[in-house]
Amino acid sequence: MREMKFFLGLQVEQMPDGIFIHQTKYVNDVLDKFNMSESTPTSTPLAQNHGICPDESGEKVDEMHYRSIIGSLMYLTVSRPDIMYPPCLCARYQSSPRQSHMTIVKRILRYLKGCLSTGLWYPKSGDFSLTGYADSDLGSCKLNAKSTTAGCQFFGTRLVTWQCKKQSTVSLSTCEAEYVSASSYCSQILWIQQQMRDYGLQFLDTPIFVDNEAAINITKNLLHNSKTKHIEI
């Protein structure tokens, strides 16, 4: 069958020092499909203070067109973790999209215009230790005040899994949102460890990096006070 070049829309470049996986052709096809090939590139897929909300008073846009863009972007996240969060955020407003939502979606396409060939690099040599990173965005959902869990896992410098998902409960503090996120990725790490045992690889001491000191302290101290005992439940 010869060396693999394409697989389900993924372009695979196998080189002596590693493998590069990207979707450059797919990105160009998406930009052509939605008439964004001549758009002005932007440096980020989402503004820091984006303020995206239901926007009930905004001008309505074509739902089918909006959903088509979202679907195309979601498939692109297979190789582009850098745009994982914005499409997931915009996907929450597919039932009644407004012009403000369409503007944010088009910004993502403009970002892709500026970095068509970004992808995943898997070097042949180097460290192969398993590490995880967990983060959260407190109360980011304007519909029900739920937080968003996000994170990723690496084998050395090789990014292998990444996720972005709305939490199932409403967090009362940044500490709680971060702790719930860390708990979720602890389960993901355990799953990866179990999968690696099939290949004869043992990862028994995997660090998970969290950027919230209070959440880290809770993991070390099993005694919960009145402000954190509900997390255990």
Image (spheres, grey):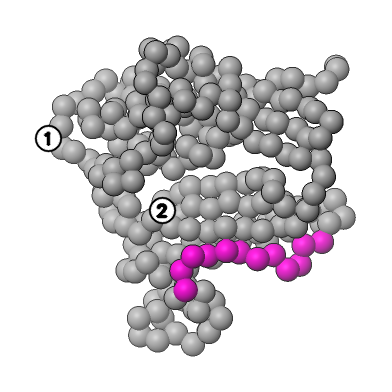
Whether residue 180 can be seen here: no
The residue lying toward the viewer, choosing from 200 and 52, is 52
Is the C terminus in the top left, top right, bottom left or bottom right quadrant? bottom left
Where is residue 39? Give x, y as percent: 37, 17
Count of numbered labels shown in the rendering: 2
The residue lying toward the viewer, choosing from 157 and 185, is 157
The residue lying toward the viewer, choosing from 230 and 124, is 124
Q: Which residue is mark 1?
A: 57
Q: Is residue 44 left or right of residue 132?
A: left
- Dominant secondary structure (helix, strand or loop) of the stretch shown in magenta: loop
Whether residue 203 is in magenta: the answer is yes
Residue 197's place in the image compared with 102, above or below, is: below
Neighbours of disc 2 within 10 Å: few (<14), some (14-19), many (20+): many
Which residue: 58% across, 30% down?
A: 118
Where is residue 136? Give x, y as percent: 43, 57
Which residue: 29% across, 46% down?
A: 49
Which residue: 32% across, 68% down?
A: 172
The residue lying toward the viewer, choosing from 74 and 111, is 111
Q: In the drawing, what numbered circle is on residue 148?
A: 2
Which image quarter: residue 92?
top left
Which range of residues does the magenta coloring cover? Answer: 202-213
Residue 26's place in the image compared with 124, above or below, is: above
| Amino acid on which disc 2 is placed | Thr
Which image quarter: residue 80?
top right
Where is residue 79? Give x, y as percent: 59, 33
Is the N terminus in the top left, top right, bottom left or bottom right quadrant? top right
| Amino acid on which disc 1 is placed | Ser
Element class at badge 2: strand
Report if the CB atoms under discs 2 and 1 are less than 8 Å apart: no
Q: Is residue 102 left or right of residue 43?
A: left
